[in-house]
Image: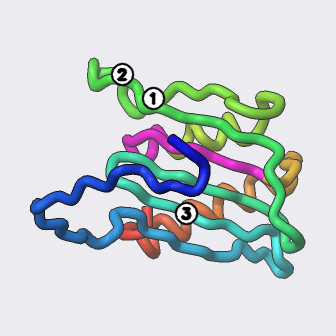
């Protein structure tokens, strides 16, 4: 093809139908007297992507995937793996959320969790899941 020419365009007689997006976005904040973190849940068919970050600019330091175990009488078990960054609190959170929601959960974190903030974040997430189950 020469520079300045356009490729041959083939038209189609098929009708295009538009569907509403299957992505559902829910943004919320977790407070414990003061702002602990901001979170965004992106729900798609069969999975959930959860971003947890601080109050400043959005950052990404860890990504983890949690997958529920098969239904072989294992109860509410799940497996998790770190996809980006060190294996830490995001991996544990992905495993617990995947077991609770019975679907794959991606957890993206821009925060460094410690032993004081992690229980606050988990408690806030579980409260939000109970209050707004349609978003998760």
Would you name the residue on which mark 2 appears? 74
Q: Secondary structure at mark 2?
A: loop
Earlier in the chain: of badge 3 and badge 2, it is 3
Category of crowding for the residue at label 1, using alpha-carbon neighbours closer than 10 angstroms: few (below 14), some (14–19), many (at least 20): some
Percent position of residue 90, x then y: 71, 41
What separation in Å lies between label 3 and label 2 (alpha carbons)?
A: 27 Å
| Circle count | 3
Nearer the observer: mark 1 or 3; the answer is 3
Left or right: 16, with 130 as reference point = left
Q: Which mark is residue 106?
A: none
Q: Which of 72/82 is in front?
A: 82
Specify which label sits upstream in the sequence, 1 or 3: 3
Q: Tell me the residue that label 3 is attached to.
A: 41
The residue drawn where x is 55% and y is 63% is: 41
Which of discs 3 and 2 lies nearer the camera? The answer is 3
Badge 3 element = strand
C-beta proximity under 8 Å, tags 2 and 1: yes
- Residue 3 appears at what percent x and percent y? 60, 49
The residue sitting at 45% across, 39% down in the picture is 104
Please tell me whether residue 36 is drawn above or below residue 112 in the rendered image.
Answer: below
Question: Does the stretch in magenta take in 107?
Answer: yes
Nearer to the camera, 49 or 80: 49
Separation of disc 1 and disc 3 at Cα? 22 Å
Span shown in magenta:
98-109
Q: Residue 53, how many percent across, how many down? A: 78, 61
Residue identifier under label 1: 77
Mark 1 falls on what kind of element?
loop
Is 67 in the magenta? no
Depicted 41 relative to depicted 67: above or below: below
Task: Answer left or right for 96 relative to 109.
Answer: left
């Amino acid at each position: 093809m020469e520079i300045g020419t356009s490729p041959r365009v083939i038209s189609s007689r098929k009708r295009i139908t538009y569907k509403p997006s299957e992505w559902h976005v829910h943004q919320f904040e977790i407070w414990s007297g003061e702002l602990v973190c901001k979170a965004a849940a992106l729900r798609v068919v069969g999975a959930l992507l959860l971003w947890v970050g601080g109050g400043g600019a959005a950052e990404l330091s860890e990504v983890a995937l949690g997958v529920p175990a098969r239904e072989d009488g294992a109860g509410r078990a799940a497996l998790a793996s770190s996809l980006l960054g060190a294996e830490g609190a995001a991996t544990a959170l992905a495993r617990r959320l995947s077991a609770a929601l019975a679907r794959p959960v991606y957890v993206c974190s821009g925060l460094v969790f410690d032993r004081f903030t992690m229980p606050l974040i988990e408690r806030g997430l579980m409260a939000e899941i109970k209050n707004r189950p349609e978003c998760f």
